Amino acid sequence: MKPFKLDTPKSLAQRVVLRLREAIIDGEFELGAVISEEMIAQSFGVSRTPVREAMGQLQSQGLVVIRPQVGSFVFTPSADDIQALCAFRIIIEPKAAELAYHHDRPGAVAAMEVAIAQMQQALAAKDNVAYGRADTALHDAFFAHCGNRYLVESYTLVSGRVAALRTNLTSPIDVQTPASFEEHRKLLRLFARGEFEAYGKLMTTHIANSGLTYARALEIA
């Protein structure tokens, strides 16, 4: 695990939240891993109070499970969780894309093109963390440019968990084959042309296949 550094000028608890969120999403903590408040406090050089507050915030984001008298753990989804999460994404992501197209097509396309370029670099380097981050950036672009804050808030409820599952479970597979990358390139082309019927079908398949990969990787299929 790389050293924890606190550079952002925010409250202690918020700085701990941001760093631990990054660590969970990037796979520094495996799914289901124990997170020791004492170890984190020592690593950050802070008291356990902001760490405890940070854990509460991460639990509200669905990234951490706190079991009283037992400890804090990185989330691990059940089969039902995965099914519900994918169903939610299948509903919300195509709509966000359609809104982004009409609200800020140039901005959304530009953000997606940057993400595609980063994915290509990560694919060449076989860097699953970089690939996962770029993959997340591409999907985030729809919400960043959709112009509807309620849709954004809804997506925020699951975005951390989706990003963590992506980096931990699908990206290690995706960097070994160009199939995922080509699928994302096709999504960009369909979006840029406003072909939302074809886009919606491909996005539905894309998300459903991700769910199957999550389930197989977690051996809960």
Image (tube, helix red, strand yellow):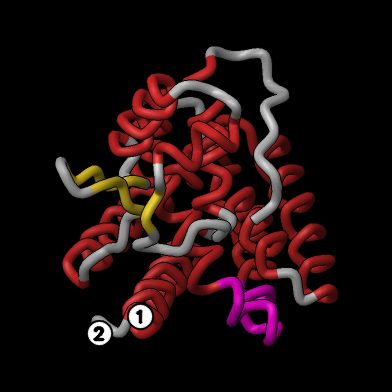
Q: Residues within 10 Å of mark 1 (few under 14, many from 20)?
A: some
Residue at image point 59% right, 14% down: 10
Given the image, on which type of amino acid does mark 1 rest? Leu
Kindly report the secondary structure that dominates the magenta region of the rendered protein. helix
- Residue 155 vertical position relative to residue 90 in the rendered view, above or below: above
Q: Which residues are magenta?
A: 171-183
Location of the C terminus by quadrant is: bottom left
Q: Position of residue 172 (x, y in %)?
A: 60, 77
Compared with 44, 201 (above or below) is below
Mark 1 lies on residue? 212
Mark yes or no: residue 190 visible.
yes
- Amino acid bearing label 2: Ala
Looking at the picture, tell me which residue is in the foreground, 51 or 180: 51
The answer to whether residue 202 is left or right of residue 151 is right
> Dot 2: within a 10 Å radius of its alpha carbon, few (fewer than 14), some, or many (20 or more) residues?
few
Q: Disc 2 versus disc 1: distance between alpha carbons?
A: 7 Å
Q: Which mark is residue 158?
A: none
Residue 132 in the image: x percent, y percent? 62, 61
Quarter occupied by residue 120:
bottom right
Image quarter where the N terminus lies is bottom right
Residue 124 horizontal side relative to residue 1, left or right:
right
- Pick the residue in front: 19 or 196: 19
Query: Is residue 174 highlighted in magenta?
Result: yes
Closer to the camera in the image, 130 or 89: 130
Locate residue 20, reporting x and y percent.
52, 40
User: According to the image, label 2 marks what residue?
Assistant: 221
Specify whether residue 14 is painted magenta: no
Position of residue 6 in the picture relative to residue 39 (left or right): right
Describe the element under mark 1 as helix, strand or loop: helix
